Image: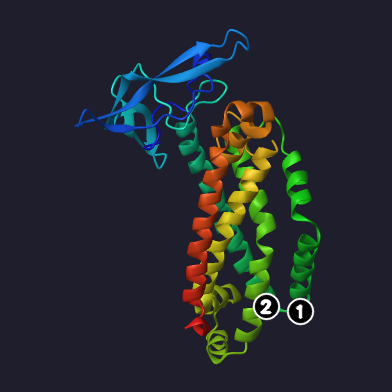
Amino acid sequence: SFFSTQDPERTDARQAFIPVQSVHFFDDGTWSPGVPAIVGKRHPTTLRMEWTTDPKKRVPIRFFGPGPEWRVLGLFRTNLHLVVPADPNQRIFLLGSDRLGRDQWSRIMHGTQTSMTVGLVAVVLSVILGVVLGGISGYVGGKTDQVIQRVIELLQSVPTIPIWLALSAALPRDWTPIQVFFAITVILSLVGWTTLGREVRGRFLALREEDFVLAARLAGCSRMRIILRHMVPTFVSHIIATSSLAIPVMIINETSLSFLGLGIRPPAISWGVLLQEAQNIQTLALAPWLLIPGLVVIVSVLAFNLVGDGLRDAADPYSH
């Protein structure tokens, strides 16, 4: 991606567990961005690599330089990156490296794309299911309403985590990362639409007797046209606010499944896959920076929650 400094899959066992490196923008009062060089020495007793900073050596960096090729929105090829080493043969580790010598910063940037995409796509599918099924339930009523409500009650009565675990464990182990990606997205959306579906049903029960709905019915509009073109737009702001609050929930769900090994699997990269490295206490004691993806998840969830709260307050006429 644009923000990565190198190929996230590039490995070098000789550079395993390099600590976080800091960027210095000035050298002797002049503009000279770079990263202090890291020198490794094996401890004679523990045989563990110990990394120290050599202040006399620097790895120069450049902004908006060429690097590994990537695609913009999956369509256009480019090799432009925000920060890269001035010498392509050198490497920098802004957030350290893992046990295989892979750059943690670049892997987090790639994992952000995956986790965010899963969260956004799953919410979109959940909104579609919630609006359509909840709208049909509230507008049509009768046996259709009873069937949809029993399905919602069934899904809500079973704890979500066992449902995710059961559905994720049912995925074939030989599926490609792309197939698993879409399967996890569908699983999250199938379980996450019920709350919005009930809210839409309650709103439609009140709206279906309104004059504009009766006028649309007398004009010969189909049920789906009345639902999508006349009834849904009356509370689209509420749907947007609810969706924004559902995004962090989906992100946490995907991260949890991948962390447990039941979601997105290596070689694909997501926040949950990165956090798998932190499952080992000994590894975590040796390289505490492997917990940084967890901090990224927390910050992202808090940011989406703040945005969702703001949208909800803006959409609530009684909050003013």
How many numbered marks, from 0 up? 2
Kindly identify the residue that appears in the image at 65 percent across and 39 percent down.
Answer: 258
Q: Is residue 80 visible?
A: no
**Residue occupied by mark 2:** 138
Q: Which residue is mark 1?
A: 142
In the figure, residue 269 lies in which quadrant? Answer: top right
- The quarter of the rendered structure image containing the N terminus is top left
**Is 62 in front, or is 122?**
62
The image's mark for residue 33 is: none
- In the rendered structure, which amino acid carries the disc numbered 2? Gly
Q: Which of the 4 image quadrants contains residue 189?
A: bottom right
298 to the left or right of 93? right
Q: Residue at x 76, y 70 (%)?
A: 149
Q: Is residue 91 left or right of residue 32?
A: right
At a point 74% along the width and 68% down the height, the residue shown is 148
Q: Is residue 157 visible?
A: yes
Residue type, numbered disc 1: Gly
- In the rendered image, the vertical position of residue 211 relative to residue 70, given as above or below: below
> How many residues crowd around disc 1 within 10 Å: few (fewer than 14), some, or many (20 or more)?
few
Q: Are marks 2 and 1 in contact (CB under 8 Å)?
A: no
Vertical side of 315 occupied by 174: above or below: above
Left-right relation of 65 to 156: left
Q: 189 or 64: nearer the eye?
A: 64
Circle 2 residues within 10 Å: few <14, some 14–19, many ≥20? many
The front one of 277 and 190 is 277
Query: Can you give x and y, in whole percent of width and height, for residue 20 in the image?
Result: 46, 30
Secondary element at tag 1: helix
* Residue 43, position as x, y percentages in the image: 56, 11
Instruction: Work out how far the residue at label 2 is from the one at label 1, CA to CA, in angstroms.
Output: 9 Å
> Furthest-top residue in view?
44
Residue 263 position (above or below residue 103): below
Q: Secondary structure at mark 2?
A: helix
